[in-house]
Image (tube, rainbow, N blue to C red):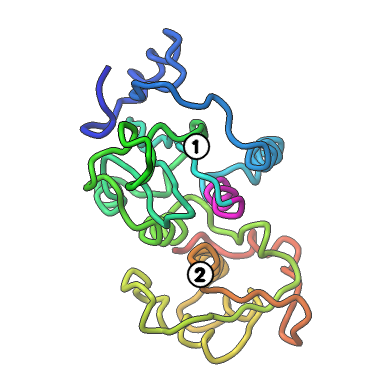
Amino acid sequence: MRDFDSTLWRISAFERARAAGETSPGVGFDRPTLLPTTLMADLQRLEANPAANDVLEVIAACLRNREAALLYLAHGPYVWPVTLFPTQQIYHSPVDVSDIAAETSLTRLKLISAEPPGVMPPGHPRHERVAASDKYRPLAALLWAVALNGPRDHVLAEIGGKAAYRLSGRIEDLPSALGALQPAAIRLRQDSASLRDIAAWPGMSPQRAARLLNALYLTGRLMVTRSHPAARDEPAGWRGLFGRRK
């Protein structure tokens, strides 16, 4: 069995291994077969709602529960295994998210499955399950990339609805990956605004506003207020009124 630390599987090979009874291809040692109960409940709720069951919602569930999980993601013809470690703020992957994004748009990412982790974070007492150090990477980079460039172009369920948003933390700590979204982030550092307000700012759109808010939220840089005077409900059907822009 090939090691996911060295290569990505083609989806066809991955599916053949699954069909042969290998529940977790590429993981060559014993591990738990079930995710923690609270995380499993969250993922089952998402699975019951196909409109909400996407890669970013699953990542958000792992962060919310602070539980490690191995996500098998379909990226073009390949399976990309990503293990999230929310407590340690790192992720394990055979390739960096920037390399994945450089080859093919992240908008094509799809979740295949979410499972207990096959590897442990650095320093774990079960050292035989700790992978090569260069395969662990900062979690924030993954969150920014998938939120800004992944398949989801509307706000995560837990920050949607009637709300006003504001940036917390320093502008200097934001990643350069924000690009043209930087002015909107700076403006959010100064004032609270609704999703509708942000979407109307220069250079923004409903989709760009949603992606920015999702990225800020997942990286712990967003304040969400339900009672602020600027808080507004998302207008019914507003997504259909705009073209898809990134």
- Mark-to-mark CA distance, 1 and 2: 22 Å
How crowded pointer 1 is (Cα within 10 Å; few <14, some 14-19, many 20+) is rated as: some
Q: Secondary structure at mark 1?
A: strand
Contact between labelled residues 2 and 1, with CB atoms less than 8 Å apart: no
Name the one closer to the observer, 186 or 241: 186
Give the quadrant of residue 159. Answer: bottom right
Name the one closer to the observer, 243 or 92: 92
For residue 127, side relative to residue 38 (left or right): left
Given the current orientation, which residue lies at the most extreme right position? 227
Vertical arrangement, residue 77 with respect to residue 59, above or below: above
Q: Residue at x 61, y 50 (%)?
A: 65
Is tag 1's residue or tag 2's residue first in the polypeptide sequence?
Answer: 1
How crowded pointer 2 is (Cα within 10 Å; few <14, some 14-19, many 20+) is rated as: many
What main secondary structure does the magenta stretch of the protein show?
helix
Residue at mark 2: 216
Residue at mark 1: 111
Q: On the rendered image, what quadrant is the C terminus found in?
A: bottom left
**What residue span does the magenta drawing correspond to?**
57-65
**Which residue type does callout 2 highlight?**
Leu
Vertical arrangement, residue 11 with respect to residue 105, above or below: above
Q: Secondary structure at mark 2?
A: helix
